[in-house]
Amino acid sequence: MRCSLPPRSRLPRLTLWPCNGAGSSIRFVDYIPSDRVYIEDDLGLDAPWLAARLHDDPALLSLSDNELTVVDVIPSDRPEALTVFLVDVASGIRHVAEVKLGDADLHQVVRVLEFWADRQADHPDAEHQPSVVAEHITPEVARAVLMAQEVVPVGAYELHALHVGEAVALHTEPVEPPATADTDSDEELAALLADTLERLDPRGPEHHTALRQRMIDRLKRESP
Protein backbone atom coordinates (compact mmCIF):
# COMPACT_ATOMS: atom_id res chain seq x y z
CA MET A 1 0.00 0.00 0.00
CA ARG A 2 1.34 3.40 -0.97
CA CYS A 3 0.82 6.22 1.50
CA SER A 4 0.20 9.81 0.47
CA LEU A 5 2.30 12.63 1.78
CA PRO A 6 1.00 14.38 4.91
CA PRO A 7 -1.11 17.53 4.43
CA ARG A 8 0.62 20.86 3.96
CA SER A 9 -0.58 24.09 5.51
CA ARG A 10 -1.87 26.56 2.95
CA LEU A 11 0.09 29.41 4.51
CA PRO A 12 3.34 29.02 6.46
CA ARG A 13 2.67 29.68 10.14
CA LEU A 14 5.06 32.21 11.67
CA THR A 15 5.10 32.82 15.40
CA LEU A 16 7.14 35.67 16.84
CA TRP A 17 8.75 35.12 20.24
CA PRO A 18 10.93 37.25 22.46
CA CYS A 19 13.63 34.81 23.54
CA ASN A 20 12.37 34.71 27.13
CA GLY A 21 8.79 35.93 26.94
CA ALA A 22 5.33 35.30 25.59
CA GLY A 23 4.70 35.18 21.87
CA SER A 24 1.97 36.16 19.48
CA SER A 25 0.99 34.48 16.23
CA ILE A 26 1.26 36.66 13.14
CA ARG A 27 1.21 36.35 9.35
CA PHE A 28 3.73 38.55 7.61
CA VAL A 29 2.41 40.58 4.69
CA ASP A 30 5.18 43.15 4.28
CA TYR A 31 8.80 42.17 3.81
CA ILE A 32 10.76 42.21 7.06
CA PRO A 33 14.56 41.74 6.93
CA SER A 34 15.62 38.74 8.99
CA ASP A 35 18.46 36.30 9.46
CA ARG A 36 18.05 32.57 9.79
CA VAL A 37 19.61 31.32 13.01
CA TYR A 38 19.93 28.03 14.87
CA ILE A 39 18.05 27.82 18.13
CA GLU A 40 20.82 26.28 20.23
CA ASP A 41 24.01 27.15 18.38
CA ASP A 42 23.21 30.82 17.68
CA LEU A 43 20.67 31.76 20.35
CA GLY A 44 21.80 29.56 23.23
CA LEU A 45 18.27 28.22 23.68
CA ASP A 46 17.43 24.57 24.31
CA ALA A 47 14.84 21.84 23.83
CA PRO A 48 12.82 22.81 26.96
CA TRP A 49 12.50 26.35 25.55
CA LEU A 50 11.18 24.90 22.29
CA ALA A 51 8.84 22.57 24.19
CA ALA A 52 7.28 25.57 25.93
CA ARG A 53 6.78 27.31 22.59
CA LEU A 54 5.07 24.22 21.16
CA HIS A 55 2.76 24.02 24.15
CA ASP A 56 1.78 27.66 23.55
CA ASP A 57 1.37 27.33 19.79
CA PRO A 58 1.32 23.78 18.39
CA ALA A 59 0.32 25.13 14.97
CA LEU A 60 3.89 26.30 14.36
CA LEU A 61 4.77 22.67 13.49
CA SER A 62 2.48 23.00 10.42
CA LEU A 63 1.40 19.36 10.69
CA SER A 64 -2.24 20.12 9.86
CA ASP A 65 -4.52 22.82 8.51
CA ASN A 66 -6.80 22.18 11.49
CA GLU A 67 -6.40 23.14 15.12
CA LEU A 68 -3.92 20.96 16.98
CA THR A 69 -3.84 20.28 20.70
CA VAL A 70 -0.68 19.12 22.47
CA VAL A 71 -1.37 15.94 24.41
CA ASP A 72 2.12 15.49 25.80
CA VAL A 73 5.73 16.57 25.31
CA ILE A 74 8.38 14.23 26.64
CA PRO A 75 12.17 14.53 26.62
CA SER A 76 13.88 12.30 24.12
CA ASP A 77 16.83 10.13 25.05
CA ARG A 78 19.07 13.01 23.94
CA PRO A 79 19.14 16.52 25.44
CA GLU A 80 18.68 18.31 22.11
CA ALA A 81 15.52 16.37 21.17
CA LEU A 82 11.95 15.86 22.33
CA THR A 83 8.84 13.92 21.33
CA VAL A 84 5.56 15.76 20.86
CA PHE A 85 2.16 14.06 20.86
CA LEU A 86 -0.72 16.04 19.38
CA VAL A 87 -4.30 15.50 18.25
CA ASP A 88 -6.14 17.16 15.37
CA VAL A 89 -9.29 18.52 17.04
CA ALA A 90 -11.44 18.38 13.91
CA SER A 91 -10.40 15.05 12.38
CA GLY A 92 -9.18 13.14 15.42
CA ILE A 93 -5.90 12.30 13.72
CA ARG A 94 -3.18 11.65 16.28
CA HIS A 95 0.27 13.07 15.54
CA VAL A 96 3.63 12.13 16.97
CA ALA A 97 6.58 14.35 16.05
CA GLU A 98 10.17 13.58 16.86
CA VAL A 99 11.72 17.06 17.11
CA LYS A 100 15.44 17.82 17.24
CA LEU A 101 17.53 20.97 17.36
CA GLY A 102 20.20 21.15 14.68
CA ASP A 103 20.55 18.41 12.06
CA ALA A 104 18.10 15.53 11.75
CA ASP A 105 19.46 12.00 12.01
CA LEU A 106 18.33 8.43 11.45
CA HIS A 107 17.76 7.90 15.17
CA GLN A 108 14.76 10.24 14.85
CA VAL A 109 13.29 8.18 12.01
CA VAL A 110 13.62 4.91 13.91
CA ARG A 111 12.25 6.44 17.12
CA VAL A 112 9.19 7.99 15.49
CA LEU A 113 8.39 4.69 13.75
CA GLU A 114 8.54 2.99 17.14
CA PHE A 115 6.17 5.53 18.68
CA TRP A 116 3.86 5.28 15.65
CA ALA A 117 3.64 1.49 16.05
CA ASP A 118 3.02 1.78 19.80
CA ARG A 119 0.26 4.35 19.34
CA GLN A 120 -1.32 2.31 16.55
CA ALA A 121 -1.52 -0.61 18.97
CA ASP A 122 -2.93 1.57 21.78
CA HIS A 123 -5.52 3.32 19.58
CA PRO A 124 -6.19 1.02 16.59
CA ASP A 125 -9.33 2.90 15.50
CA ALA A 126 -7.55 6.25 15.11
CA GLU A 127 -5.43 7.51 12.23
CA HIS A 128 -1.84 8.18 13.25
CA GLN A 129 0.61 10.56 11.58
CA PRO A 130 4.33 10.39 12.47
CA SER A 131 6.72 13.22 11.57
CA VAL A 132 10.41 14.01 11.80
CA VAL A 133 11.17 17.68 12.55
CA ALA A 134 14.60 19.32 12.74
CA GLU A 135 16.25 22.60 11.89
CA HIS A 136 17.98 20.86 9.01
CA ILE A 137 16.69 17.69 7.34
CA THR A 138 19.77 16.05 5.87
CA PRO A 139 19.58 14.32 2.46
CA GLU A 140 20.08 10.96 4.18
CA VAL A 141 17.09 11.52 6.47
CA ALA A 142 14.97 12.85 3.60
CA ARG A 143 15.70 9.68 1.61
CA ALA A 144 14.93 7.48 4.62
CA VAL A 145 11.59 9.24 5.15
CA LEU A 146 10.71 8.87 1.48
CA MET A 147 11.46 5.14 1.63
CA ALA A 148 9.48 4.67 4.84
CA GLN A 149 6.46 6.30 3.18
CA GLU A 150 6.02 3.05 1.26
CA VAL A 151 4.33 1.64 4.39
CA VAL A 152 4.05 4.48 6.95
CA PRO A 153 2.63 8.01 6.34
CA VAL A 154 5.68 9.70 7.84
CA GLY A 155 6.59 13.29 6.99
CA ALA A 156 9.76 15.39 7.23
CA TYR A 157 9.71 19.06 8.21
CA GLU A 158 12.33 21.74 8.72
CA LEU A 159 11.90 24.08 11.66
CA HIS A 160 13.26 27.52 10.76
CA ALA A 161 14.19 30.16 13.33
CA LEU A 162 14.49 33.75 12.08
CA HIS A 163 16.01 36.65 13.99
CA VAL A 164 13.58 39.56 13.52
CA GLY A 165 14.73 42.60 15.47
CA GLU A 166 14.90 41.56 19.13
CA ALA A 167 12.59 38.58 18.64
CA VAL A 168 12.70 35.11 17.10
CA ALA A 169 10.17 33.94 14.51
CA LEU A 170 9.57 30.20 14.19
CA HIS A 171 7.94 28.37 11.29
CA THR A 172 8.02 24.89 9.82
CA GLU A 173 8.04 23.74 6.20
CA PRO A 174 7.69 20.27 4.63
CA VAL A 175 10.82 18.95 2.95
CA GLU A 176 10.87 17.84 -0.68
CA PRO A 177 12.49 14.51 -1.67
CA PRO A 178 16.24 14.80 -2.30
CA ALA A 179 17.40 15.27 -5.87
CA THR A 180 20.36 12.91 -5.56
CA ALA A 181 20.81 9.33 -4.46
CA ASP A 182 23.64 7.24 -3.07
CA THR A 183 23.17 3.61 -4.12
CA ASP A 184 25.28 2.00 -1.40
CA SER A 185 23.96 4.27 1.33
CA ASP A 186 20.36 3.81 0.17
CA GLU A 187 20.71 0.02 0.39
CA GLU A 188 21.87 0.47 4.00
CA LEU A 189 18.96 2.81 4.74
CA ALA A 190 16.47 0.34 3.30
CA ALA A 191 17.98 -2.44 5.41
CA LEU A 192 17.76 -0.30 8.57
CA LEU A 193 14.13 0.61 7.92
CA ALA A 194 13.15 -2.95 7.01
CA ASP A 195 14.86 -4.22 10.17
CA THR A 196 12.96 -1.65 12.26
CA LEU A 197 9.57 -2.40 10.71
CA GLU A 198 10.14 -6.15 10.92
CA ARG A 199 11.02 -5.81 14.60
CA LEU A 200 7.84 -3.82 15.21
CA ASP A 201 5.65 -6.18 13.14
CA PRO A 202 7.42 -9.52 12.52
CA ARG A 203 6.36 -11.17 9.26
CA GLY A 204 9.34 -13.31 8.33
CA PRO A 205 12.43 -13.07 6.09
CA GLU A 206 10.56 -13.12 2.78
CA HIS A 207 8.46 -10.12 3.77
CA HIS A 208 11.59 -8.36 5.05
CA THR A 209 13.37 -8.84 1.71
CA ALA A 210 10.33 -7.73 -0.30
CA LEU A 211 9.81 -4.67 1.90
CA ARG A 212 13.44 -3.65 1.51
CA GLN A 213 13.12 -3.81 -2.28
CA ARG A 214 9.81 -1.92 -2.27
CA MET A 215 11.42 0.94 -0.39
CA ILE A 216 14.35 1.09 -2.80
CA ASP A 217 11.92 1.09 -5.73
CA ARG A 218 9.91 3.90 -4.15
CA LEU A 219 13.01 6.02 -3.77
CA LYS A 220 13.88 5.53 -7.43
CA ARG A 221 10.31 6.22 -8.50
CA GLU A 222 9.65 9.31 -6.38
CA SER A 223 13.03 11.07 -6.41
CA PRO A 224 13.21 14.08 -8.77
Image (cartoon, rainbow, N blue to C red):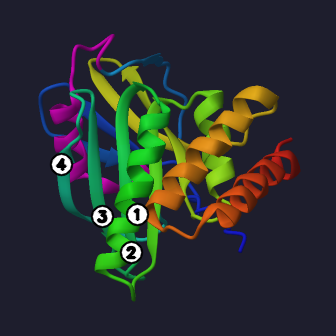
> Which residue bears the numbered disc 1?
116
Task: Residue 72: give x, y in percent of width and height.
Answer: 18, 59
Can you tell which of label 1 and label 3 is closer to the viewer?
1
Residue at (54%, 50%) from the top-left corner? 195
What's the CA distance linking mark 1 and mark 2?
A: 6 Å
> Which residue bears the numbered disc 3?
86
Can you tell which of label 2 and label 3 is closer to the viewer?
2
**With 102 as the anchor, is 192 left or right in this view?**
right
Label 1 CA crowd tier, 10 Å (few <14, some 14–19, many 20+): many
Task: Check disc 4 and report its element: helix, strand or loop.
Answer: strand
**Residue in the foreground of this view, choosing between 67 and 84:** 84
Task: Check disc 2 and report its element: helix, strand or loop.
Answer: helix
> Which residue bears the numbered disc 2?
120
Circles 1 and 2: CB atoms closer than 8 Å: yes
Label 3 CA crowd tier, 10 Å (few <14, some 14–19, many 20+): many
Task: Check disc 3 and report its element: helix, strand or loop.
Answer: strand
Label 2 CA crowd tier, 10 Å (few <14, some 14–19, many 20+): some
What's the CA distance linking mark 4 and mark 1?
A: 15 Å
**Residue at the top extreme, as displayed:** 42
Residue at (71%, 53%) from the top-left corner? 212
**Residue in the foreground of this view, choosing between 208 and 82:** 208
